[in-house]
Image (spheres, rainbow, N blue to C red):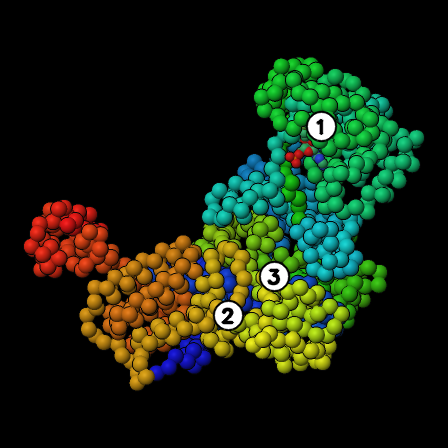
Amino acid sequence: MKYIPNEIEARWQKYWAENNTFAASNHSEKPKYFVLDMFPYPSGAGLHVGHPLGYIASDIYARYKRHQGFNVLHPQGYDSFGLPAEQYAIQTGQHPEKTTRENIARYREQLDKIGFSFDWEREVRTSNPDYYKWTQWIFIQLFESWYNYDSDKAESIKVLIDKFERNGNANVNAACDDNIEDFDADFWNNLSEKAKQRILLKYRLTYLAETEVNWCPGLGTVLANDEIVNGVSERGGFPVVRKKMTQWSMRISAYAERLLQGLNEIEWTQSLKDAQTNWIGKSVGASVKFQVTGYEEEMTADEDDPIIEVFTTRPDTIFGVTFLTLAPEHELVSQIVTDEQKAAVDAYIEATSKRSERDRMADVKTISGVFTGAYATHPFSALPIPIWIGDYVLAGYGTGAVMAVPAGDQRDYDFAKHFNIPIENIFEGVDISTEAYSSKDNIKLKNSDFLNGLDYKSATKKVVEELEQIKTGNGKTNYRLRDAVFSRQRYWGEPFPVYYKEDLPQMIELEHLPIALPEVEKYLPTEDGAPPLGNSKEWAWDTINNKVVSNDLIDEKTIFPLELNTMPGWAGSSWYWLRYMDAHNDKRFVSEEAEQYWQNVDLYIGGSEHATGHLLYSRFWNKFLYDRGFVSKDEPFKKLINQGMILGTSAFVYRLDGTNTFISKNKIEGKKVQPIHADVYLVNASDELDIESFKNWRPDFASAEFISDENGKFYVGREVEKMSKSKYNVVNPDDICNEYGADTLRLYEMFLGPLEQAKPWNTAGITGVFGFLKKLWKLYFDDSGLIVTSNPASKDALKTLHKTIKKVQDDIEGFSFNTSVSQFMIAVNELTAMDCHERVILEPLAILISPYAPHIAEELWHRLGHEGSISAVHFPVFNPEHLVESSKEYPVSFNGKTKFFIELPLDLNPKQIEEIILKDERALAQLGGSAPKKVIVVPGKIINIVL
Ligand code: ANZ
């Protein structure tokens, strides 16, 4: 009987689907285990062999856990809102819903071929109304909440209103907008409803605010920082500029400290934790207020007091401040600039608005800035400090203003040198004539009034105390993490459940959700620059009938306009793992019961590119839902592993310069050639090009000439590059499945190397893995059928089996899947050499391999006479006794030359061994009657007789 993977695999895939073999139950006596994959965005190109790598690893783990007696939830779905479908819609006029549905169908077909143990009954699609209904609901919950730093959690906005009504905001310690005036209960209670709502917006966890955003004219939308790479949009590579717009924002900054602390509780790689830690960017220091000179008394009531607040991590250097620098966007600039400097300042602001924040951060060489003409007063020395603006200071970080200390900060130093601003050296025994002094420990201060002779630590403490005393500053912790802009000017995203009444946002009640995406004629922004939903003629909310109605009916009394923006790509993916727990619930986003059972994700596998986007937003939303009592765990993903990228092995043909003649790789030496990508599908496992197919591949090669080598062969060159369509090195998993079967694909993907490392794909290596499966098959079958016996197993076979159980179990638990594949190969080679066909060995062997190669394992199990799926059978138990060696086959040497072997128990001592040897006939023959000079015995190793 031959091993025919296609037959076997189709049969078992059908069996699994028909029997719902991998459906997880929400009620089980078994312990639970939740294995999650980062769900795919279904692009038009389909999957290549790089995509399933993580899915195969998580599938092995999920299957292993089932064998260990766990109730495993291993779901899959689609992150199906997003830009590519919309761009495609703009280009082709096709509805993104249609292309998304088609792409999903293709993905599903490809995934099914690989034999994943997904519970497809729980599939989610973020673009389905029954899913985004709950994304809208979560948005509303965020709107109805504020963050209380005293209890250190999110609370209902009603609690805040209650506080305002009783005591005003004086004792409220909230995450909120800057510059909120203090008010008392009377003031609050006398406000109009509208005024109250305005104030509450400054406290809500999702709020409307005029923010500086990254505006991408090419895509017609706002982008998040992590959607921009090197100053251009990640998708499409369009330029990005800064622009002020009213946008929904998420107050993720309220969670900065908890997002940081939570990292200590989870099993993530250090590199991932470092990425999040840096992104959150905690800095401990102080806030210091500098009064602008000349304004102390002339303030009118409605004018902002021109006090420049700076954030510094080095309060100890306060006596080294020789100027202040404001970001060009700083709101005080226009107020304090002197008439003489106004033209220069305006010109500078205009020039810098063209530079992106990233450019500004990256560029440390260009020094630019301008004097405002104004001065501030030093809080301790009372000396006048000139106020400059410079674009090395970022508007969005800290307070957008710095106290510049050329002695201690290189950028300040360079700035001072450039503009000839005096530099005050405040460090004892340090030369700062050529650069700022950056190390802070163990160095004493001088020229610093009450700080002279103090070191960094005590000076920092002293300055903060003094500042607090004179009410000009205080200790402060700053985070780089900013609130996340949540509005996108796009069509293919979740609509907000929001309408506007007198410019104030109003939430639509849960019972009327989802607010479904309307039909539009065009997916582009409207003529007057409104987002694409502005093209819809039916996009108004009727508050009497609670439904979406025609825009013509808007009367601002009972019918109001709906929000035109949609939510960003990360909205739907920030809670999807919860929906898998209870995917069809139409009463709640997840039932309490299901959530209590599954709690959180035990193992999450996905790409490292989501380190600071998806993985921060998800933790934020989960913590929020936890605070409000909707979920039971603070952290969503207990353990997380990043799979490495699979690289393509590109093929190159070499064209003689200036000709249409191609030359075999082994003939190019000394010739001027131009390497050109050839599709990897045109090259065989020995790197020979199929010339005829190559000619047919592209018209410009049809008439090309080819110079082969002496043997008539034409070789290509190979190079490892990113797997990508444009490099013609993409390998489609369907082709591998068709030719060798999914089990071979799965084993080979794992065999390529450690899961977390990047590694090149090379289709040539796959035949080895395919050969291994054929060899495995032959342990069970010969040409006429099953050859498995019920004989007892030999000691050696048991040893091979138990060695393998131990290795595979340790490997799976340590996520070292590649080494398991090697062990399977060793085991099958050993058992083949032993001619082992015993059921007691081969049954457990089938179970061992089933997480990796589930189809062949099912088939073997079935043919061994079992009913039902192998996936539920208990994993073989390792018995160390089978590995203990009780005897040793000693080589027996005479004067160092091995003459024969003898098997002896291992527990004999050297004396006993010597006695046995000297009676052995073969030894007696060697000795020829004479006594040996010496007998050397190393127990467990050697016996040497010196003649
Ligand atoms: C005085 C000083 C003296 C500073 C010294 C540093 C060294 P991190 O660690 O990144 O938080 N700073 C503050 N706000 C800024 C902004 N919006 N744009 C650019 N720079 C800004 O660094 C905080 C330090 O960076 C602050 O401490 C401030 O300069 C500067 F010897 O204040 B320092």
Q: Which residue is mark 3?
A: 722
Residue type, mark 3 in image: Lys
The percent coordinates of residue 602 (x first, y second) are 45, 54
Rendered position, 758 above or below 623: below
Which picture quadrant has residue 596? bottom left
| Left or right, residue 933 beside residue 543 | left
Q: Residue at x 85, y 23 (%)?
A: 294
Which residue in the protein does label 1 denote? Answer: 435
Placement of the N terminus among the 4 image quadrants: bottom left
Distance from the alpha carbon under mark 2 to that under mark 3: 18 Å
> Residue visible at 70% across and 15% down?
447
**Residue shown at 21% from the left, 67% from the top:** 794
One can see residue 187 in this view: no
> Camera-side residue: 78 or 449?
449
Q: Which corner quadrant of the image does residue 476 belong to?
A: top right
Ligand 1, image quadrant it occupies: top right
In this rendered view, identify the residue nearer to me: 256 or 757. Answer: 757
Q: Position of residue 738 (x, y in %)?
A: 50, 78
* Amino acid on which disc 1 is placed: Glu
Of mark 2 and mark 3, the one earlier in the sequence is 3
Counting from the top left corner in percent of width and height, residue 893 is at 19, 54
**Vertical order, 404 against 244 (above or below):** above
Helix, strand or loop for disc 3: strand
Left or right: 607 as drawn, with respect to 821 = right
Q: Amino acid at mark 2?
A: Ala
Answer above or below: position of 468 versus 575. above
In front: label 2 or label 3: 2
CA neighbours of label 3 inside 10 A, class few (<14), some (14 to 19), many (20+): some
Residue holding disc 2:
764
